[in-house]
Amino acid sequence: MPLKVKEFMTKDPISHVVPSPINEIVSILIKNNITGIPLRNQDGKYVGMVSRKDIFKNPEETQLAMVMRKSEPVNENDSIEDAAKIIVSQGHRHITVVNDNNEIVGILTPQNFLSFVREKFGTIPVDRFSSKFVYPVWNKTPLPVFYHIIQITSLYAFPVIDRDGKLIGIVTDRDIFDNIDLRTELIKSETGMADDEDPWSWSGIRNVFSYFVQRNRISLPDIPLDDVTIKNPYYVVSDSPLSDAVEVMLKGNYNQLPVLSGEGKLRSMLYDIDILGVFLEDH
């Protein structure tokens, strides 16, 4: 009997109602340290999804209805194979799970599938599913320039190399926000945070740094990328089994890993959503 979505999904996710202003969504993303949430109408029925990337692409928009994606949900009784195929085809990491009444009951991301992939497809070589498109950045790149690279490429994780092309680290959009001067007054005014609410955590604020940057509310310091890079990152070798990569991703809650050749040179990147490609193959 096929395994069902409800056995793997994250149950009872945070959701929000449409219509609403964008600042309410930003507040939820920050306070809960999440990157996307499903949306419902006034009757409690699923209508779409919004993620921080959707907000990044529309930094001047103020209404949620203008930013949300009307992405296809999956039913809680669908097979996980079918759900994985939909995630891959849509190209987005979040997918909403609904019941027969079109009510939100769960959410799936590639992370929900990793343990199953490790057990059933763990012997497949990493190289079969790693992304051959890799955009390395030089460790001396100024931080403002790196931000423009994020905008142009729509990527949010980059291997960092030295002048000899050697992998020395990895940087994501979350990693650079520690170096930005963001005043408490700005956070309150932009997100509607009240004085009696819990303090913001830096890990949560990093989720939406680009939202503030693109609205010209803050400026990035003119420092080299080297100052914010995570050094000596975990990586996998291209001929390693998927089980090795999944183990690292699960332990560190990583969405991506650099992939090196047997000679130790940067070869590609492995993203968790690409790993779901195992469900597209005949086995």
Image: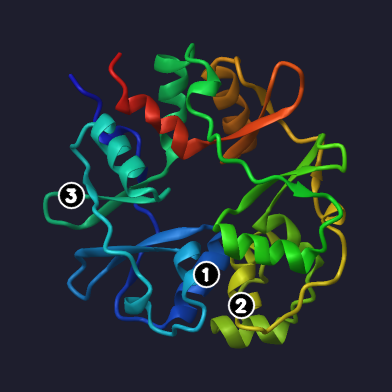
Quadrant that contains the C terminus: top left
Is 125 left or right of 181, judged from the image as shown?
left
Which residue corresponds to mark 3? 99
- Residue 208 lies in quadrant: bottom right
Quadrant that contains the N terminus: top left
Is 16 left or right of 220, judged from the image as shown?
left
Query: Which numbered marker is on residue 114?
Result: none
Percent of width and height locating residue 273: 45, 39
Residue 6 visible in the shown view: no
Percent of width and height locating residue 132: 55, 34
Residue type, mark 2 in image = Gln
Give SS at disc 1.
helix
Residue at 29% across, 76% down = 18
Residue 34 visible in the shown view: yes
Q: CA distance from mark 3 to mark 1?
A: 30 Å
Q: As displayed, is residue 72 above or below residue 4?
A: below
Q: CA distance from mark 2 to mark 1?
A: 8 Å
Q: As displayed, is residue 60 above or below residue 170?
A: below
**Answer yes or no: do the residues labelled 2 and 1 have beta carbons within 8 Å?**
yes
Query: Which numbered marker is on residue 56?
Result: 1
Is 130 left or right of 180, judged from the image as shown?
left
- Disc with the residue nearer the chain's start (2 vs 1): 1
Percent of width and height locating residue 84: 32, 36
Residue at 31% across, 43% down = 89
- Disc with the residue nearer the chain's start (3 vs 2): 3
Residue at 82% across, 55% down = 228
Q: Residues within 10 Å of mark 3 (few under 14, many from 20)?
A: some
Is 77 left or right of 257, judged from the image as shown?
left
Q: CA distance from mark 3 to mark 2?
A: 37 Å
The front one of 91 and 263 is: 263
Residue type, mark 3 in image = Asn
Which numbered mark, 3 or 2, is in the foreground of this view? Answer: 2
